[in-house]
Image: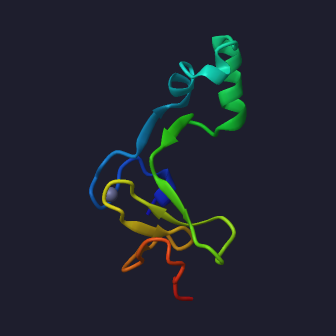
Amino acid sequence: MARIDELTNCPECNSSWDGGDIFETLRPQKWCENMSDDELREDVHKHYAPPHRFSRLVGVEVRGGYDGVSFWECPDCKARWDRFTQRKVVNAHASSGSAVE
Ligand SMILES: [Zn+2]
């Protein structure tokens, strides 16, 4: 099975997690209005991994748990997967941080 964060669609509800091309998304933003297309493209390639697209997949951190993303959550159906085992998490509600070891 592919890693959850490498999928382009939710295996549960099949909604697209494609958040769009990073360059196209950033170009109209104000912070980079003085950058040329080439400069912005270079910046995107420096800071983001290929294929340089945003993902709508939500990284969930558990307070008091692992320092970083512990779960991936679909923004549409709220299904969650354990980041380490890639397994779907059943009955993990919101950010209660009550994940059982
Ligand atoms: Zn979903």
Residue 31 location in percent, x, y?
66, 23
Q: Quadrant of the C terminus?
A: bottom right
Q: Is residue 18 left or right of residue 5?
A: left
Residue at left offset 41%, top offset 40%: 18
What scheme was used to colour the molecule?
A: rainbow
Q: Residue at x 28, y 52 (%)?
A: 14
Viewer-nearest residue: 2 or 85: 85
Residue most toward the bottom? 101
Lateral position of residue 82 relative to residue 50, left or right? left
The quarter of the displayed image where residue 87 is located: bottom left
Ligand 1 - quadrant of the structure image: bottom left
Location of residue 54 in the rendering, given as x and y in whole percent from the top left corner? 51, 39
Q: Compare residues 27 and 47 and report the one nearer the observer.
A: 27
Please give the name of the residue rendered at 37% of the width and 80% of the height, measured from the top-left corner: 91
Place of residue 2 in the rendered image (x, y in percent of width and height, measured from the top left): 46, 59
- Answer left or right for 14 relative to 49: left
Relative to 32, residue 20 above or below: below
Whole-percent x, y for residue 6 in the image: 49, 51
Which of the two residues, 59 or 50, is positioned nearer the viewer here? 59
Q: Is residue 90 above or below residue 83?
A: below
Give the camera-side residue of 48 and 33. 33
- Residue for point 66% across, 64% down: 68
Splitting the image into 4 quarters, where does residue 30 fall? top right
* Number of callouts: 0
Tell me: residue 57, above or below residue 51: below
Quadrant where the N terminus is found in the figure: bottom left
